[in-house]
Amino acid sequence: MKTQGIIPVMLTPFTADNQVDYEGLRKLTDWYIDNGSDTLFAACQSSEILYLSSEEKIKITQTVIDQTKGRIPVVTSGHTGGTFEEQLKELQSMYETGADAVILITNRLDPNNEGTEVLKANFDRLLHALPKDITLGLYECPVPYRRVLTDEEIRYLASFDNMVVLKDVSCDLAAIKRRLELTKNSNLKIVNANAAIAFEAMKAGSQGFSGVCNNIHPDLYAYLYKHKDSSDPIIQELAHFLAICGACESFGYPNLAKLMHVKIGTFKHYGSRVIPVDIKEKYWAVEEFLDHIMQQSDKWREKLSLR
């Protein structure tokens, strides 16, 4: 199993009465796959895990796995608990869904930001309590705070053969390059999540992209990744366009990405539990902003299809 390449952090569609729209989730799963995704990341921050019940997180993961039907790997987290007992129960439940990897959130391994020894001790305690055949990953989720791993921690965690992927949220190209060097003889793959440095990170060796704009145009990121070593000027132009589009995260994400999916018919409602207000009212001209991104994305698809 290769948990690398284009890895969308999946959205959770909701119905008009704020329940999980599982039929919409099935359609969304197919959309990701049809648009160049290599792995799906269910029950993550973009899925609104802090606003989902344990039962919803499990059912969301199971629904994605069922709909994927083995076409590409599915990884999942749902790792939000504050106590060891809560975290163990969450991670065990996600393991039992049959996901290809269970993703540990770094700020849950060190909830109070106390440092390396605490993070290692919490990781070791979980590892010894979880099934021996579990496959793991890591995610520097920025909520409730961004716990960026140190070089020492990267080296330590990469020493475990069942640790296969890090969703890197350092947002630092130099750090990514160091991490690639630290993990080069391990199974741990470094996948950048920051749109501004996506292309440079790919060229440096980051094994893909796992940023929020994979919810808008994963096919364009897939093209960029496939052609990361090309000297064709159009690839650099594409990289510039995608980097600029990354700014859309500040305009009501994840609702903004959901609004795009409503426009293209993936599901029916763009509301979220994270942002309970209507983004069309809170963010001036946000729909027009999204329309520009969608129109230019289509122009890029047309341009690249002619090459």
Image (tube, rainbow, N blue to C red):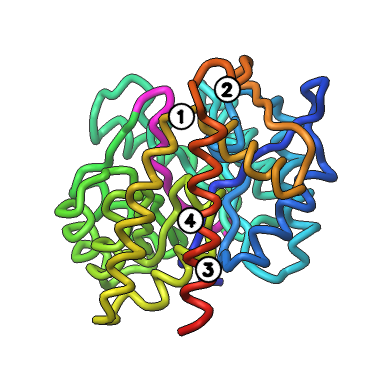
Mark 3 to mark 2 CA distance (whole Å): 27 Å
On residue 251, the disc is 1
What is the chief secondary structure element of the magenta stretch? loop
Query: For the residue marked with disc 3, what is the amino acid?
Result: Arg
Q: Disc 2 on helix, strand or loop?
A: helix
Q: Name the residue: 32% across, 39% down.
A: 120
Where is mark 2, residue-wise? 279
Q: Is residue 131 above or below residue 90?
A: below
Q: Residue furthest bottom?
A: 307
Determine if residue 90 is in view: yes
Query: For the residue marked with disc 1, what is the amino acid?
Result: Phe
Q: Disc 4 on helix, strand or loop?
A: helix
Q: Name the residue: 65% across, 49% down.
A: 95
Where is mark 3, residue-wise? 301
Mark 4 to mark 1 CA distance (whole Å): 18 Å
Q: Name the residue: 78% across, 32% down.
A: 20
Q: Disc 3 on helix, strand or loop?
A: helix
Q: Is residue 135 above or below residue 110?
A: below
Where, quadrant-wise, is the C terminus in this rendering?
Answer: bottom left
